Image (cartoon, grey):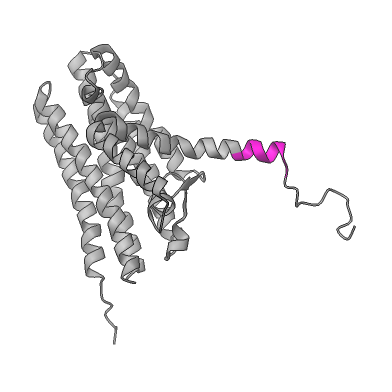
Amino acid sequence: MRVKKGIALIPTLLTLGNGFCGFLAISKVVDGLAFQGSEGFADNIIQAAWFIFLAMIFDALDGRVARLTNQTSEFGVYLDSLTDIVSFGVAPALLAKVLYEQTLIEAGIAYNVKLPLLLSSLYMLCAVLRLARYSLESETGDEAHKAFSGLPSPAAAGVIASSVFFLFEGGSSLGFTLSDPVVLNLKRASIFVPPLLGLLMISRIEYVHFVSRFVRGRKTFNYLAQGLLCLFLIAFCHDWAIFASFLLFVLSGPILAGFKICRDFVSPDKNRPAEGKNLRD
């Protein structure tokens, strides 16, 4: 007789909340197509971006709650990856594609319809590969969550979602707005960002686990002050502060990897014995 295994209720509901927010983001992108050339398009696109960020909150909570309550399981790992495909794979890819196409349509600029489809599909497929690899290599316990191999899919989605705030509201919190030609060129160039993020997701570049490094455990007063400063900037300057934060995190991986390569090249491992030298000397 087959024994039925129980399901961790609260972590599972949080994970499903992640997927539901991803679906809402997709629906808002689709709804925006009905408001082509009006403010309704921007409103729906911005709401889609916020739903992606809400999905990130659920994604951050489900694993943490599961570990705190000792309810981690393979079911939770695979369910988490499936919902992440919707929230951080399909939703951002569709968001980038529609934003690019509608921008050029409104500006009366002809474009190759295959280009946004190809580049956004590449991002989505890389996200699927990244999440499949994570499911296979993921281990339970806090010690296994110190760093990521490859750009995390929520961070990649965060760049695309936060770019919406920057492109539609950039500078408004500081008392100025970007000029129309600048915004148009930035939106036209934004379609090349998703494939670059996709390549970083499937790479082996190491990224610091931000929550484990800077939030979890006891910290000094300086960490508290820095955290309050970040929250202040995000609350009052979200149109550019969120985008800048995600962009810096994405760039931190290649920059630190480059520093490490240069350091190893200039200063080889001193513990490694010289070639031909007797280890007993």
Q: Main secondary structure of the magenta part?
A: helix
Q: Give, as a single range, the part of the protein colored magenta.
A: 260-268
Q: Left or right: 181 with respect to 151? A: left
Q: Nearer the viewer, residue 244 or 189?
A: 244
Q: Quadrant of the N terminus?
A: bottom left
Up-down relation of residue 181 to residue 227 (above or below): above
Q: Residue at x 41, y 53 (%)?
A: 219
Give the quadrant of residue 4. bottom left
Q: Residue at x 88, y 61 (%)?
A: 280
Q: Residue at x 21, y 23 (%)?
A: 172
Horizontal and vertical percent position of residue 236: 23, 33
Horizontal and vertical percent position of residue 194: 36, 34
Give the quadrant of residue 154. top left
Magenta highlight on residue 240: no
Q: Residue at x 38, y 52 (%)?
A: 215
Q: Quadrant of the C terminus?
A: bottom right
Magenta highlight on residue 261: yes
